[in-house]
């Protein structure tokens, strides 16, 4: 996106009236190559300039915008566009050149008032979207909102369950006892298993609250820095690849007599290795120095990481102990919660298991 400041009717005039006639003409350009996949510019008109556009022929507008681009990007030659689309919204019977704007007496809730349904009628459009007025995406979002209101008026609001995803419980196996004594034993086992499931859920919830207290106070455990991965030969290869490739291509052409012959990547890598081995100390020195500096920075980062992790572990242990003392787990002496979970061992966002 880039803009254009229009010149005054009188050169270098300081009177605002001299800028009125050209105000809003091609004042903004959008580069749409990323969205369209083609070299495309969208030029915008505003105010009186938009109304004047409705009365201007296509050739006049194309010549004017091309001339303005030529001045902006001089001395580059700007050709005429291969294709043009000129919109005239005032002549559109469904638009008439209008869109919402903020007037002097506008109140903050006016857009919401415009969006309110009237009986069975529901309204959409950018003028009903207070967050994105006067935009295409505002019109799109308002359409989604109006469609949702219509559905709600027909079938009623959709109730979202809470929690959205139910906790999975272990399903109990279907048991077929062979005797009355075995039946009582299996019933006892099922009762014990259900009790264990309840305790497990309760313990997981409590452990999650402990972890939440730790994260809220000191944040995530520091992440170990990665290795520098700097190699002097790879740095040398990056700088001399194209030079070596050109030489290898020449050798390949002379050997084959084919002017279009090209050396393979294996041949280029072999030649680069030979060049590196035969390179002087002066040539190798900057690459070796860069590698050594990277290793020293990695060592310093690792030492700092170890110190930060040690401090984090101490604080996490303190927070855990204080939390258990202030809010002891129900039905437990707290012994099983005095260890550390995966997050405190550096497990990050993986599954966190209770450690006893």
Image (tube, rainbow, N blue to C red):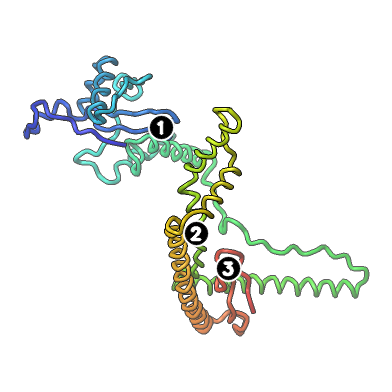
Q: What's the residue at 28%, 28% (across, down)?
A: 76
CA gap between label 3 and label 2 equals: 27 Å
Q: Disc 1 on helix, strand or loop?
A: helix
Q: Is residue 206 above or below residue 225?
A: below
Figure quadrant of the N terminus: top left
The Cα–Cα distance between marks 2 and 1, rounded to whole angstroms, is: 37 Å
Distance from disc 3 to disc 1, alpha carbons, whole Å, reads: 43 Å
Q: Judge depth for marks 3 and 1 and give the one in front.
A: 1
The reply to whether discs 2 and 1 touch (Cβ–Cβ < 8 Å) is no
- Say which of marks 3 and 2 sits in front: 2
Give the image location of residue 144, x and y in percent: 46, 38
Crowdedness near tag 2: few (<14), some (14–19) or many (≥20) residues, C-alpha within 10 Å: some
Question: Which residue bears the numbered disc 3?
Answer: 347
Neighbourhood count class around disc 3 (C-alpha, 10 Å): few under 14, some 14–19, many 20 upward: few
The residue lying toward the viewer, choosing from 58 and 311, is 311
Q: Earlier in the sequence, mark 2 or mark 1?
A: 1
Q: Which residue is mark 2?
A: 230
Q: Which mark is residue 33?
A: 1
* Disc nearer the start of the sequence (3/1): 1
Asked if residue 183 is positioned above or below residue 143 in the image, the reply reads below
Instruction: Residue 14: give its label.
Output: none
Work out whether residue 243 or residue 109 is closer to the camera in this orientation and state it: 243
Compared with 257, 290 (above or below) is: below
Q: Earlier in the sequence, mark 3 or mark 2?
A: 2
Quadrant in which the C terminus appears: bottom right
């Amino acid at each position: 996106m880039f803009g254009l400041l229009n010149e005054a009717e009188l050169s270098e005039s300081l009177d605002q009236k001299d800028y009125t006639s050209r105000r809003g003409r091609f004042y903004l350009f959008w580069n749409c190559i990323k969205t369209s996949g083609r070299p495309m510019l969208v030029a915008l008109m505003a105010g009186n300039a938009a109304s004047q556009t409705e009365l201007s022929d296509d050739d006049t507008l194309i010549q004017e915008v091309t001339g303005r681009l030529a001045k902006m990007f001089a001395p580059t030659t700007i050709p005429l566009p291969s294709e043009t689309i000129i919109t005239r919204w005032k002549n559109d019977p469904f638009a008439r050149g209008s869109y919402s704007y903020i007037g002097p007496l506008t109140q903050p809730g006016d857009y919401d008032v415009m969006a309110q349904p009237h009986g069975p009628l529901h309204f959409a459009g950018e003028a009903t979207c207070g967050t994105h007025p006067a935009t295409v995406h505002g019109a799109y979002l308002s359409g989604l909102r109006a469609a949702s209101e219509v559905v709600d008026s027909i079938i009623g609001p959709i109730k979202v369950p809470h929690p959205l995803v139910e906790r999975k419980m272990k399903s109990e196996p279907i048991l077929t006892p062979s005797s009355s004594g075995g039946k009582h034993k299996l019933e006892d086992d099922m009762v014990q298993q259900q009790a264990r499931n309840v305790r497990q859920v309760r313990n997981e919830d409590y452990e999650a609250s402990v972890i939440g207290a730790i994260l809220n106070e000191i944040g995530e455990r520091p992440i170990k820095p990665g290795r520098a991965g700097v190699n002097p030969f790879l740095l040398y290869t990056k700088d001399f690849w194209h030079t070596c490739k050109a030489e290898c291509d020449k050798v390949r052409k002379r050997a084959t007599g084919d002017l279009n012959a090209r050396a393979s990547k294996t041949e280029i890598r072999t030649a680069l290795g030979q060049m590196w081995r035969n390179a002087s100390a002066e040539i190798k020195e900057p690459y070796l120095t860069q590698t050594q500096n990277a290793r020293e920075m990695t060592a310093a980062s690792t030492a700092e990481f170890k110190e930060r992790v040690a401090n984090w572990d101490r604080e996490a242990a303190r927070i855990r102990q204080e939390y258990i003392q202030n809010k002891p787990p129900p039905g437990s002496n707290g012994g099983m919660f005095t260890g550390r979970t995966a997050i405190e061992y550096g497990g990050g966002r993986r599954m966190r298991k209770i450690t006893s």
